[in-house]
Image: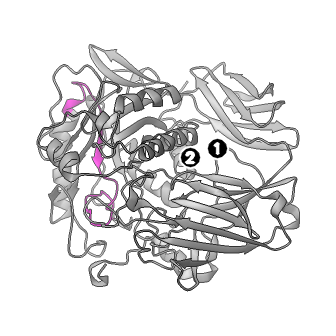
Amino acid sequence: MKAEQFARLYTAAGEDLARAGRDAAPWQDYPRPCLVRDSYLSLNGTWSFSANGGPEEEILVPFPPESLLSGIGRDMGPRPRLCYTRRFTLPADFLRDRIILHFGAVDQVARVSLNGIFLGEHRGGYTPFSFDITPYLATENLLTVEVTDTTVDFTLPYGKQSGKRGGMWYTPVSGIWQTVWLESVPEVYVRALTAETHETGAIIRAEGVSEGEVTVITPEGEITLPLQNGEAAVALPCPRHWCPEDPYLYRFTLRAGEDRVESYFALRTLTVETVDGIPRLCLNHKPYFFHGLLDQGYFSDGLFLPASPDGYTEDILAARALGFNTLRKHIKIEPQRFYYDCDRLGMIVFQDMINNGRYSFFRDTALPTVGLKRRNDRRLHRDPAARAAFLSSMEETVALLRHHPSVCYWTIFNEGWGQFCADDACRRLRALDSTRFIDTASGWFTPTESDVESLHVYFKPFKMPKAPTRPVVLSEFGGYACGVKGHIFNLKKTYGYRIFDTVEELEKAVRTLYEEEIFPAIPRGLCGAIYTQLSDVEDETNGLLTYDRRITKIGPIPLLSTNLPKGDPPCGT
């Protein structure tokens, strides 16, 4: 990169963190809100770091080394070899029977050692992993994490990262990019929790323990019931259903032997139903319009991570203030704090799987854009290792996020990137989770197996398909660009689908787009619309927020009652 072409943009929180320097202690919040235990020791902060056999320097974990906030802020090369080390001692009051070491995410292949003893390897850059380190602890401990990043091989899922960033492809990240932390647990402890909900209650399942008790807080008071054979069935006499307008969470405590954990669940159902002859996506059996924004999850100073967990809260509240109820998390998995914030603040998430395989502009974008949207995807991306890696990542994604009521919709493939055997993938996903909507192929190359007809329209007016047989979702549109001086990353190039010189022109165009094309289509069957996008990202100045989150470019685009499908509110008691 030429330094004069790219601005160093900091968010307000990032500016404060950078000012703290070596004393910074980022991301100290408890990282696993679905299973909270009173023992927690963060290892975030200053670590020793070397890249590609080079000299040792300092890095601020958990920010990736390519980011400004890491203190390094440079490209690590096409196949980086990174080494992190950190010394730590355990407080005397922290020790219990066992100590577990957790990593939120490391991109892409991590080999972890403690005191010179190899603990294990994890492959994949977006999901958490852990090790029981009890037998290997000493009075003072040396933790070593060796990382290799194989994004350029396209085998492991990589999302929007590209070694040749530009346009709709972004700066790649590598290494540790989520919280590293320790917890102490008794010999017998809750290893995982799930809550299978239905319209009037839930079945709570605990892995690792058999007997105990569960106490659920309800609006009518507490309910205490036994945990038997690792299960507790919760019946709610006055169920209160979750939706963005009333994001009610049932919080509960589980006690089993010496262990005590806290969690929550929410009641909501997602169904495809025919209403007045039109196929609709329904929330709690009521037609619901998913009024959303594309959310890439990139930040100007932390890249894959905001300076503080509150960055997620602020993005969600900004989207709500603009009138939106849905975020499409685009080809990226976030730390669980993001999904918890969506759960509690009432923001629906359309969650993409992470693509891998080779992308072809001609095959995957140019031809479909001019109307050639059919192909046999069984013959594409035939590398067995890449196919296995994608399917494994899909399974890990479902296991990680299925607890979150805000996650209402899975997208398997986007615009053909890495798409293969899509019908088979949909059947596999439905076997893993039949409770959420499935968009098998967002944009084009739609297979037989999909809950929705998913369309991307950028370069022509949107028109509702005639007599659709499935609910119609406009899963990408808009992309109108307008740079705001002083808040632009790429000072020489910009990327968007229509370019405007002023925010006033941008706001007028966006309002016209909704009023003339989107809102009139809702009574005719449009079930959701995802505008591109929440914030600017690098070359793209097509966000409603600037990349540094300092400026909101337009005013709210609220849904009016006259726009909505008929029906009672989808939530409450």
Quarter of the image for residue 421 reads top left
Q: Tag 1's secondary structure?
A: loop
Give the main secondary structure of the magenta stretch. loop
Quarter of the image for residue 491 reads bottom left
In-front residue for pair 329/248: 329
Pointer 1: what residue? Answer: 34
Amino acid type at mark 2? Tyr
Mark toward the start of the polypeptide (2 vs 1)? 1
- Whether label 2 touches label 1, CB < 8 Å: yes
Is residue 65 one of those drawn in magenta?
A: no
Dot label at residue 219: none
Q: Residues within 10 Å of mark 2 (few under 14, many from 20)?
A: many
Residue 236 as seen in the image, left or right of residue 17:
right
Q: Residue at x 45, y 77 (%)?
A: 73
Q: Tag 2's secondary structure?
A: helix
Residue 103 in sight here: no
Q: Is 307 above or below relative to 476?
A: below
In-front residue for pair 30/85: 85
Q: Residue at x 31, y 36 (%)?
A: 441
Pointer 2: what residue? Answer: 340
* Quarter of the rendering occupied by the C terminus: top right
Q: Residue at x 49, y 56 (%)?
A: 312
Residue 573 as seen in the image, left or right of residue 272:
right
Residue 432 percent coordinates (x, y): 52, 30
- The magenta region covers 520-546
